Image: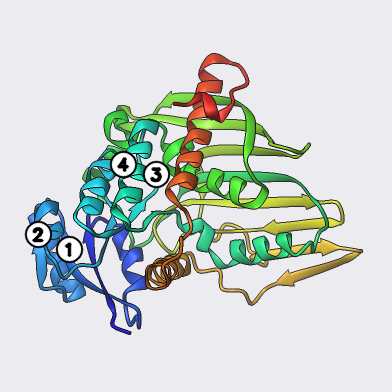
Amino acid sequence: MRKLKFGFIGTGAITDLHYLGYKDSDLVELSAICDTDADLLKKRSKQWNVKTAYTDYRDLLSNEDIDAVEVITPHHLHAEIGKAALKAGKHVSIQKPMAINIPDCDDLIDTAERSGKLLRVFENFRYYPPMVKAKQLLDDGSIGEPLSIRIKVVQGVGGDDWEIPYRRWKWRFDPAQGGEGRVILDYGYHHFSLAIWFMGEIEKVKAWITNRTIQNGWILDSPAVAMWKYKHADKYGNYEAMTSDDLFVPSKYGRPEDEWIELSGSKGFIWINRCTSELMDRAPLVMYRDGETTEFKEIDSDWGSSFVSGVRDFATAINKGHTSTLTGQEGKAVLQFCRALQLSAKENREVRPEEIL
């Protein structure tokens, strides 16, 4: 089987992690890259030994040798580039969120259906090994009937050699480019994706979000607290996010933020004790049932591994002609969840995700 030829549209800091899935891969090769920053493009071309480079994504899409693309740009460009890529006959993986509004999600889904090509929304937490194992344990009934989920998120400060330049960070705080909501939408998309993946569809939400001004005049939507009820059962979830410039969060990848999750069942509990960083010195995954505690100390807990698995999953789906995690419809549902939380906080009421149109 020949390797699939991929192109990157966008080569910012996060692509260091995306590239891990291509390094020494037996399924894919990175054959072309694109970025509007010519200097960065030159650097990446040398770093990754990719000789075909473009400053206009349309030129990359016209390259008939490219089978698929990863869209790794600011959020407001995802829908435009994703649709163009599908129309050009490429399979498309879009970095979450797939778009910043629901009409663009619908357009992407429709374009994918008409093109016959695969559309995948890339949200790497679903590929993080402790999350994958927790999902397996939950689905296997290891803690009985799932009853609730609790997600705790912290953002602090940290220092290491993986830094995101200011000019490539500021767009996340620009509502027109980042979609408004650095915590609830940009970062929170990961967590709310997991909430659906672990426990099912959301019936209604209630949220409290503090929007405050931080450095550079940016608006940060934290602290935040949210609760939700799942459809078709008396099952619930809750979420808490906090930010502190006095909290040190050790991080291998320059993102001083971390999360831990508790899944409660009728017969026990599952705790996922880290993901993005390494805040707590505990086993990455722990399960309690019938008076016994099992610690999964040896499980791979490197955040970078989720990117490797994500690339492999998408390539396998293309080769075998089946869907990949997340589909366009699933990606849209997560965006509706995020937007419902924001609307709930704004209007101080319960909101159903289907209200977000």
Sequence-first disc among 1 and 4:
1
Alpha carbon separation for disc pair 4 and 2: 20 Å
Which residue is under mark 1? Answer: 33
Res 122 label: none
Sequence-first disc among 4 and 2:
2
Amino acid type at image mark 3: Pro
Which residue is under mark 2? Answer: 54
68 with respect to 35 (left or right): right
Alpha carbon separation for disc pair 4 and 3: 7 Å
Residue 231 in percent (x, y) is at 69, 36
Sequence-first disc among 4 and 3:
4
Which residue is under mark 4? Answer: 75
Alpha carbon separation for disc pair 1 and 2: 6 Å
Alpha carbon separation for disc pair 3 and 2: 24 Å
Name which residue lies at 56% across and 38% down.
241
Name which residue lies at 40% across and 32% down.
102
Name which residue lies at 63% across and 64% down.
281
- Crowd class of label 2 (few under 14; some 14 to 19; many from 20; radius 10 Å): many
338 with respect to 59 (left or right): right
Residue 118 in percent (x, y) is at 36, 58
Verify CB contact (< 8 Å) between mark 1 and mark 2: yes
Verify CB contact (< 8 Å) between mark 3 and mark 2: no
Alpha carbon separation for disc pair 3 and 1: 21 Å
Between 105 and 152, the one lying in front of the other is 105
Amino acid type at image mark 1: Ile
Sequence-first disc among 3 and 2:
2
Name which residue lies at 51% across and 18% down.
346
Element class at badge 2: strand
Element class at badge 1: strand
Amino acid type at image mark 4: His
Res 97 label: 3
